[in-house]
Amino acid sequence: MLIRIRAKFVADIEIHSETENLKIRDITFETLEFSGKVSNCFFTNTGGHTELDTDLNLQACRRRSRMILETKRLTLRPWRESDAKDLFRYASHPDVGPTAGWAVHTSVENSRTVISNILSVPESYAVVLKETGQPVGSVALMIGKLSNIGLPDTEGEIGFWIGVPYWGQGLIPEAVRELMLHGFEDLKLEKLWCGYFDGNDKSKRAQEKCGFRYHHTKENVPCALKGILRTTHFTCISKEAWLLQDHGKCVW
């Protein structure tokens, strides 16, 4: 019998069979094949394509995201505590956080705490420039109850930001399109949502470039800034509409 996991991601793998156990910890690989009658398979990822022989006695298969996504210019990977200095460099700018609804970072240690307590969750990615290997922004996919807007498990909400020096270069639309591809194809989501606070025209344009369309407006929405209420405009795109855009590639 054969189990085949094909993707490019970082994963912890445990496969238990009648004859041997296979454990692979925290590695990146393209294809893993294992032969034998499998009783249990545990692996931590949410992406790529998983192929299981239909005759396998598979009792359990659990997933958590540690995936690596790639575009022409970017690598989207999980945040690391060692990214704190780079995160602080961009998240300390007054034009970034407050516009997105969170407080300016005050120190490298503050950024390290944010990585540990907020950014180290499933489907949260550092936006890393391939050219430098350094993170310059963040994108995240919050599915179902993890979203800020109370979505069903078949839908997700995308959030994003990027450092001021990289505004206007199309990097966030590039990252968001890859996350949309991951959400619709790998995670089998049916609809994706975004939102922007009133006056945040940059976020609005980035969402429009990726095919998101206005859905509704909600006033007096709380955010991470204590005591601040905002007017939020929500956009969304269905999988059907996304498929009409040549699998997430913008046509205009």
Image: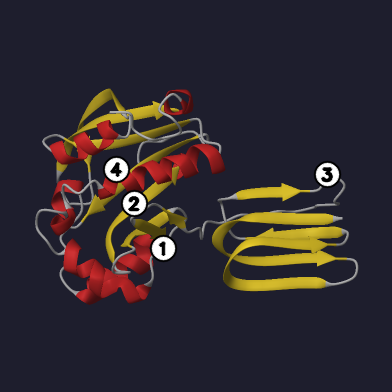
Between the residue at mark 4 and the residue at mark 3, the CA separation in whole angstroms equals 38 Å
Residue of label 4: 173
Per the image, label 3 sits on a secondary structure element best described as loop
- Rendering coords of residue 5 (x, y %): 68, 55
Q: Say whether disc 2 or disc 4 marks the residue closer to the N-terminus.
A: 2
- Rendering coords of residue 204 (x, y %): 20, 35
- Rendering coords of residue 53 (x, y %): 81, 48
Q: Quadrant of residue 37?
A: bottom right
Residue type highlighted by circle 3:
Thr
Residue of label 1: 120
Per the image, label 4 sits on a secondary structure element best described as helix
**Which circle, 1 or 3, is nearer the viewer?**
3
Between the residue at mark 2 and the residue at mark 4, the CA separation in whole angstroms equals 10 Å
Q: Residues within 10 Å of mark 1 (few under 14, many from 20)?
A: some
Residue type highlighted by circle 2:
Val
Q: Is 116 located above or below residue 47 in the figure? A: below
Q: Residues within 10 Å of mark 4 (few under 14, many from 20)?
A: many
Quadrant into which the C terminus falls: top left
Q: Is 195 located above or below residue 163 in the figure? A: above
Per the image, label 2 sits on a secondary structure element best described as strand
